[in-house]
Image: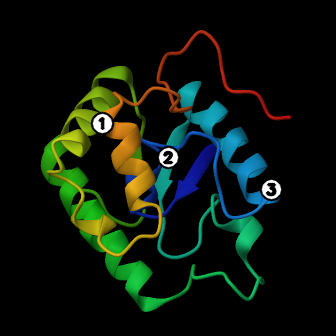
Amino acid sequence: MTIRLRGHHLLCLLTFVGEGYTPSFTRNYLRIAQRLSAGEAIEIIDGPDDICAPMLGLPEAHCCNENIRDRDNRALAAVADLLGFSLGVGSMLVLDASRLDALRAAFARDSIRAACDECEWSALCTRIAVEGFRGALVDAGASATPRCD
């Protein structure tokens, strides 16, 4: 199987520590973190993805807003530039330990965060990066995976 992700979620997954919009959103994201940590492939898609799924249909969902699509495009460009290959809709990616480390190092340096402008989670993500990503639940090659209670 593959995990279907929109562009900006390539940045969000770097700092996911189990917080989210709703309990169902968080439970879903925890399952995705487990799958990513186990090395499951990512397929880049346009629009709402596997992480967005629990939010679709809720009045507070922003998944289809144009500014979110712009965020996706900025994130994909930054990640592609860092990793040294093209990324777009339909691209496949596996986050091995070296890619995850490179992404987190760049995120901590603030060199791939242009897509994070105006994101309500930005302060939390900054704190997690400053703390060395302690508690982040996506860990490529991890021997233990996050729990889904």
Asked if the residue at tag 1 contacts the one at tag 3, i.e. Cβ–Cβ closer than 8 Å, the answer is: no
Residue 6 lies, with reference to residue 41, above or below; the image says below
**Mark 2 or mark 1, which is nearer the start of the sequence?**
2
Mark 3 crowdedness (10 Å alpha carbons): few <14, some 14-19, many ≥20? few
For the residue pair 71 and 43, the one nearer the viewer reads as 71
- Kindly report which numbered mark, 1 or 2, lies closer to the viewer in this rendering: 1
Q: Give the structural element (helix, strand or loop) at label 1.
A: helix
* Residue 3 placement (x, y as % from top left): 59, 48
**Mark 1 or mark 3, which is nearer the start of the sequence?**
3
Residue drawn at x 76%, y 62% as measured from the top left: 22
**Mark 2 or mark 3, which is nearer the start of the sequence?**
3
* Residue 45 placement (x, y as % from top left): 48, 66
Q: How many marks?
A: 3
Distance between the alpha carbons at the discs numbered 3 and 2: 24 Å
Distance between the alpha carbons at the discs numbered 1 and 2: 26 Å
Q: Quadrant of the C terminus?
A: top right
For the residue pair 48 and 131, the one nearer the viewer reads as 131
Query: Which residue corresponds to mark 3?
Result: 23
The answer to whether residue 1 is left or right of residue 126 is: right
Q: Is residue 133 visible?
A: yes
For the residue pair 1 and 74, the one nearer the viewer reads as 74
* Residue 30 placement (x, y as % from top left): 69, 41
- Type of the residue with mark 3: Pro
- Type of the residue with mark 2: Ile
Query: Which residue corresponds to mark 2?
Result: 42
